[in-house]
Amino acid sequence: MEPQTENLKTAWQLSLGSYYISEEYGFLLPNPLRELPDHYRPWMEIAKKLPHLIESHQLRAHVNKMPLLSCQFLKSYRQQRLAHLVLSSITMGYVWQEGETQPKEVLPRNLAIPFVEVSRNLGLPPILVHSDLVLANWTKRNSEGNLDTIILFPGGESLRGFILVTVLVEKAAVPGIKALAQAMHAVLQPSQDALLKALQQLKLCIQDMTRTLGRMHGIMPPCF
């Protein structure tokens, strides 16, 4: 066997965790934090009141009073992910507080500097993205496993439902993620039986994801 093929085999035997993919939760961040260290209380206080501050047109005034905080006390990966969720949410609210007619074109330093810093640390863009809105924005409300969002947005229960159903779709994708890795490994072996088994598992996973996505119809208004 050629060395290059052998190296490819070895690469596909690496754990999903090497790529921040959880064996249990897939691309979802496992057990996201709900609170940042006390140093970042000014961020959290605003983020927890985000819908009210946006709807009452007070968010920009509150953000302008925030202290400029360094990201040096964000020690763990999960702390950085929560910080990115919080800062991206505040940023979107700050820009669009007055709707499409009066967007803010410049962010204040006390928001822009830490947001760019934590974005660079994570390799994420300084904007609200799927990895914030969904992958790191879920929590278990109680021991029964009922879900809730960590950061709320204007849009009420419809938006909350949209986020949480998307979380469930991501969770349903986990067997498919594993099946894809198994399929690639089967190709490199090569093993036709293993490949067929992996593709069958992938098919079942896609069907499960589709059924889960169908739950949107009971949550979103008909106009969507």
Image: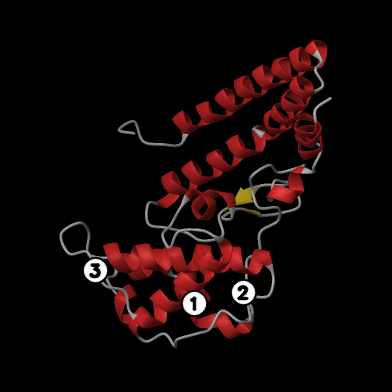
- Against 207, is 6 above or below? below
- Secondary element at tag 3: loop
Task: Name the spot of residue 38 as percent of width and height, x first.
Answer: 62, 83
Q: Nearer the viewer, residue 78 or 125?
A: 125
Q: Quadrant of residue 40?
A: bottom right
| Residue at 74% across, 32% down | 178
Q: Which mark is residue 158?
A: none
Q: Are marks 3 and 1 in contact (CB under 8 Å)?
A: no
Classify residue 158 as left or right of residue 83: left
- Against 108, is 195 above or below? above
Distance between the Cα atoms at labels 3 and 2? 27 Å
The amino acid on which the numbered mark 1 sits, given as a three-letter code, is: Trp
Q: Nearer the viewer, residue 84 or 210?
A: 84
**Residue 144 visible within the image:** no
| Residue at 81% across, 32% down | 6
Classify residue 7 as left or right of residue 146: right
Q: Are marks 2 and 1 in contact (CB under 8 Å)?
A: yes
- Against 4, is 203 above or below? above
Q: Which residue is mark 1?
A: 43
Q: Which residue is mark 2?
A: 36
Distance between the Cα atoms at labels 2 and 1? 9 Å
Task: Name the spot of residue 109 as percent of width and height, x first.
Answer: 36, 81
| Mark nearer the viewer, 3 or 2 | 3
| Residue at 58% across, 29% down | 212
The numbered mark, 3 or 2, whose residue comes first in the sequence reads 2
Residue furthest left in the image: 101
Q: Which residue is mark 3?
A: 104
Task: Name the spot of residue 34 as percent of width and height, x first.
Answer: 63, 66
- Secondary element at tag 2: loop
The amino acid on which the numbered mark 2 sits, given as a three-letter code, is: Leu
The amino acid on which the numbered mark 3 sits, given as a three-letter code, is: Lys
